[in-house]
Image (tube, rainbow, N blue to C red):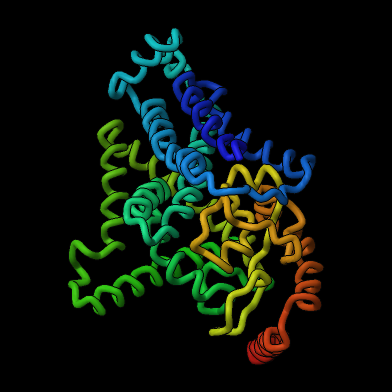
Amino acid sequence: MFSFGYYNILLLGTFLSFLYGQAWMWLGFTFLVAASVIGDRLLPHDTSRIEGNPSRILNFLLYSIFPLLLANVFAFIWQMTPGDWLGIGQWASDLFGIDALAHKEARSTVHTIGAILSMGLLSASGGTNVAHELVHRTWDPKAVYLGRFLLSFTFDTSFSIEHVYGHHANIATRKDPASARRGESLLPFAIRSTYGAIKGAWAIECERLRKRKLRVWGYHNRFLQGQLISVALLALYASAGGWQAIVLCLGVGIYGKAYLEMVNYIEHYGLVRVPGSPVAPRHSWNSNHYMSSILLYNLTRHSHHHEKGHLPFWKLEPMAHSPMLPYGYMSMILLALVPPVYKRVMNPRLSEWDLNFASEAEKSLLKNEETGKGNHFQSAV
């Protein structure tokens, strides 16, 4: 249970790394990539179940991600902008006995790249991932608002609308922009998914407001509320370093958003469902790899999550008999960056899914899609 606190410890470490500067700023990126890939490879799979309902402890670990991540954002802004913004450098020197300002002045391009890679990955694996857990708690407005705030770090607050009310309803169908199709490579998927998610979130919110007879362009529009939060974050960056800081903020946000789309890509790649049919565990790729599970709050138990989206992360089951990814999340993402390799790895799994998981209706749907591709090719010729 307390293994879910590892990410909190990491955020304390990365906060200090941004204050100390120099090569230490690679800590977040290096640890998340190396620990995930190596740990998932060497450690046994996590099929444990948490007994009882330790919601207070686990919610504390979950909610404390927000102040820890915000502290990282402030330290990162200070490190990347000129001067001693908010006196953070002097505070760090007094408290920890380090010459933070001197280290900052000695920052090289390599150090800067490490800081950006670390902050972007933290914004996604910490911010977006925890936000994903919170925005599903639709019975708790405070949780949803906090989730939306966390999503502002990657300028993706519309995710809180489209994911819950769109993706979960349309998973593994052509209507869902966040379900990768067979043979689709990562880049075109990410573009299609990003555009489709924004478009879908706006449509869902407009429909909700119309049903309640509220103005679309008004305070009650959750889509617009989210954009205002993102604008406020940009203003915070601008106050520290002007337009250069804004460019930096946008770069980190886009990188973090790209990580989300990589995760979306691997979670449903190539799976199909007949529109209107019940969502089942077979419509998501599952993973019980240890490091991925604890660092991502059981996001990896994706089959059960899509079957029962309202469950908190500690109640999700490992579902060992659902479709399984061959490697952990970070390893799968790295493979997805090389489309031919990813497809070579996943094609046998898709064949196995067709044989052992797909319903007769889904097999027919796949056959029709393949026929459609062939007809399209002949027409093009």
Quarter holding the N terminus is top right
Q: Is residue 371 above or below residue 26?
A: below
Relative to the observer, which residue lies in front, 152 or 344?
Answer: 152
Is residue 195 shown to the viewer in this render?
A: no
210 or 239, nearer to the observer: 210
Percent x, y for residue 214? Answer: 19, 73
261 vs 349, left or right, is left
**Left or right of 79 on screen, residue 209:** left
- How many marks do you count on the picture? 0
The answer to whether 313 is drawn above or below residue 71 in the figure is: below
Q: Is residue 94 left or right of residue 307?
A: left
Q: Where residue 225 appears, x then y in whole percent?
A: 26, 57
Please name the residue shown 64% across and 60% down the image.
266
Question: Residue 26 location in percent, x, y?
Answer: 57, 29
* Residue 164 in picture, x, y percent from top left: 44, 65
Q: Residue at x 65, y 89 (%)?
A: 372
Query: Which image quarter is the C terminus in?
Result: bottom right
Residue at 60 percent of width and 51 percent of height: 298
Is 125 left or right of 154, judged from the image as shown?
right
Residue positioned most to the front = 52
- Residue at image position (37%, 31%) is 74
Q: Quadrant of residue 280?
A: bottom right
Asked if residue 276 can be seen in this view, the reply is yes
